[in-house]
Image: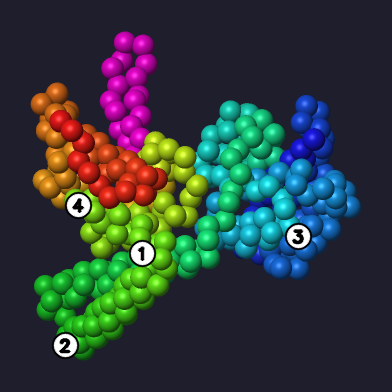
Amino acid sequence: MNYYIGIDIAKDKFDCLWLRDVDALKIKTKVLPNTTKGFGLLKTWIEKNITSDLNTVCVTMEATGIYHEALCYALHEIGVRVSVMNPAFIRDFAKGLGVRGKTDKKDSMVLARYAALVQPREWKPEPKDVRTLRAMLSRLTSLEKDLQRENNRLEKAEISQASETVIDSLQLMIRSIGTEVARIKKQVDDHIEQNPTLKKNRAILKSIPAIGDVLSREMLALLESKDFTSARQVAAFVGLVPKLWESGKMKGRTTLCKNGSSHLRAVLYMGAIVAIQYNPDIKRQYERLLKAGKTKMQALGAAMRKLVQICFGVLKHQSEYRPQMS
């Protein structure tokens, strides 16, 4: 027998709801601090009120920035089965249940019912080296955005003929951030080089035409941090699966679902621009789609998806890229 708990988590606290009876919707709730002490209190509460066999406990929560991460690791370490869901999926599920309004208790109730009815996939923590890589890449992305903003401000200041004090300040910040960007990039590359598995897999990824330093870092972090079982899962996670909107006689249009990281899609877009020129498989697909009447953006979306699929394939088979036969 499994026991289902929904947890709505915030910065300072989390609301737990145990769904005691799925059909009658009988519940038991507890609010605890989002701290190490609170994690210990949750374990005690589960063992006292639900079961001492923690392997039968299924906890479901939403991916809320970084606030859920520490609790996920703590629960996994004690044997609780954890699922981390995309908030958009839970929101749509709540609408389907006819839930009106939004409170922490209602949210945890929806999460518990989702777990009981859908049986979501269990979350698995990534290896420590991969977690470190992801954290470094996140920092690098933030710095690059800051650098772009400062460059935009400098351009605006120069056009508006701002004072030398303002321009000097902007130039100083640009140099400082640029130095830090270069330092973090080197640390990322050094981290990969020092880990035999990451080093080998990055070399495999870079054997794909259009996969360079930037995209190999991003795809390496993604594919090493998630337990994907198919290339389609990866494409869906990144937000590159096409969706069709049509009803009755109305002929709809196909767009990308755009779930997941917009930053990764932006990097993949630039990779696809290169791939349609230099990657033989993607170039052939791109030209075929254009001849079939697809727009350039639709063909580029397919190129991004194909690039993700190739990345998954070469790592799965641990072999360098080889073009497919015509």
**Callout 4–callout 2 Cβ contact below 8 Å:** no
Horizontal side of 17 relative to 303 (left or right) equals right
Q: Percent from the top left, x then y, of residue 113? A: 69, 35
Disc 1 crowd, CA 10 A, few/some/many (<14, 14-19, 20+):
some
Q: x, y (%) of residue 260? A: 41, 47
Circle 4 crowding by C-alpha within 10 Å: few under 14, some 14–19, many from 20: many
Q: Can you give x and y, in whole percent of width and height, for residue 35 in the image? A: 70, 67
Sequence-wise, the earlier of marks 2 and 1 is: 2
Q: Distance between the residues labelled 1 and 3?
A: 42 Å
Q: Label for residue 164?
A: 2
Depth order, front residue of 87/165:
87
> Of discs 3 and 2, which sits in the foreground?
3
Hey, what amino acid is under mark 3? Leu
Q: Name the residue carrying label 1.
A: 199
Work out whether residue 173 can be spotted.
Answer: no
Asked whether disc 4 touches disc 1, contact meaning CB atoms under 8 Å apart, the reply is no
Q: Mark 4 points at which residue?
A: 210
Which quarter of the picture shows residue 12?
A: bottom right
Q: What element carries label 3?
A: strand
Q: Residue at x 58, y 28 (%)?
A: 96
Q: Which amino acid does label 4 sit on?
A: Ala
Cα separation, mark 4 vs mark 1, equals 18 Å
Q: Are marks 1 and 3 in contact (CB under 8 Å)?
A: no
For the magenta stretch, what is the residue range? 238-256
Residue at the disc numbered 3:
32
Camera-side residue of 293 and 283 = 283
Q: Earlier in the sequence, mark 4 or mark 2?
A: 2
Q: Distance from label 3 to label 2 (Cα)?
A: 53 Å
> Residue 255 lies in magenta, yes or no?
yes
Which residue lies most toward the right here? Answer: 48
Question: What's the magenta bit mostly, secondary-structure-wise?
Answer: strand
